[in-house]
Image (cartoon, rainbow, N blue to C red):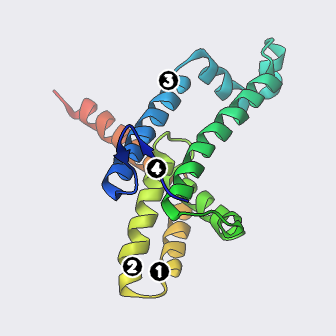
Amino acid sequence: MRAPDVAGVGFQDPANFHMVLLVIFALCVSLMLSITGSHYGLALRGVRASPARMAALGYPVDRIRYAAFVLAGALASISGVFFAYHNGYVNTSVFDIQRSVWVLLVSILGGVEAFAGPVVGVTVVVFLESWIGQLTARHAMVIGVLFMLTILLAPEGIVGRLNALRARWVTRKGVDAP
């Protein structure tokens, strides 16, 4: 599969392809941030926390969940398109259990409660895979140990732990300040 030419710009060039990918990523993040801060985002959080309570308050819980599922599918399809153009093909090996576990790993490592958590998790794991992969063939074991340490020492993930440390520092600084 060949990446298309749009308005005379060839996306076979990696610089053009990655620039468009970055712009689409920024647009998707801004869309998700605007949804998170909207009334619908608050309803989504309420449905996640207590669907029975939201239903009792008169919110259409099933429609809220359905809309979230459709939105997640739409955003996932955008990444699928870029994946197909980047690799040139898509086969069933990208849907194996190892990839599913990898997605869960990076999300938990970064922090599922924080908006930036999965992005931080992906960045850390990809960096470690490439850096440690140059040093040893057992990079998966090192990342597994890092994952276990994160679960034990920072169950809220990297971003959650950093937010907690920042909150403690701000509180301490505010108390100690004259």
Label 4 belongs to which residue?
119
For the C terminus, which image quadrant?
top left
The quadrant in which the N terminus is found is bottom right
Q: Earlier in the sequence, mark 1 or mark 2?
A: 2
Q: Residue at x 44, y 41 (%)?
A: 25
Secondary structure category for the residue under label 2: helix
Which tag, 1 or 3, sits closer to the chain's start? Answer: 3
Q: Which mark is residue 34?
A: 3
Q: CA distance from mark 4 to mark 3?
A: 17 Å
- Residue 7 drawn above or below residue 90: above
Q: What amino acid does circle 2 point to? A: Ile
Query: Is 46 on the left or on the right of 176, as rendered?
Result: right
- Secondary structure under tag 3 reads helix
Q: Is residue 104 above or below residue 91?
A: above
Label 1: which secondary element: helix
What residue does disc 2 label? 132
Contact flag, marks 1 and 3 (Cβ < 8 Å): no
Query: At x 27% / y 31%, what residue is drawn?
Result: 175
Q: Which mark is residue 139?
A: 1
Instruction: Let me know if residue 64 appears in the view.
Output: yes
User: Circle 2: is it few (<14), some (14-19), or many (20+) Cα within 10 Å?
Assistant: some
Instruction: Classify 10 Å Cα crowding around label 1: few (below 14), some (14-19), many (20 and above).
Output: some
141 is higher (above) or lower (below) than 38: below
Badge 1 vs badge 2, beta-carbon distance below 8 Å: yes
Q: Residue 43 vs residue 113: left or right?
A: right
Q: CA distance from mark 1 to mark 2?
A: 5 Å
The amino acid pointed to by label 3 is Ser
Residue 144 at x, y percent in the picture: 54, 74
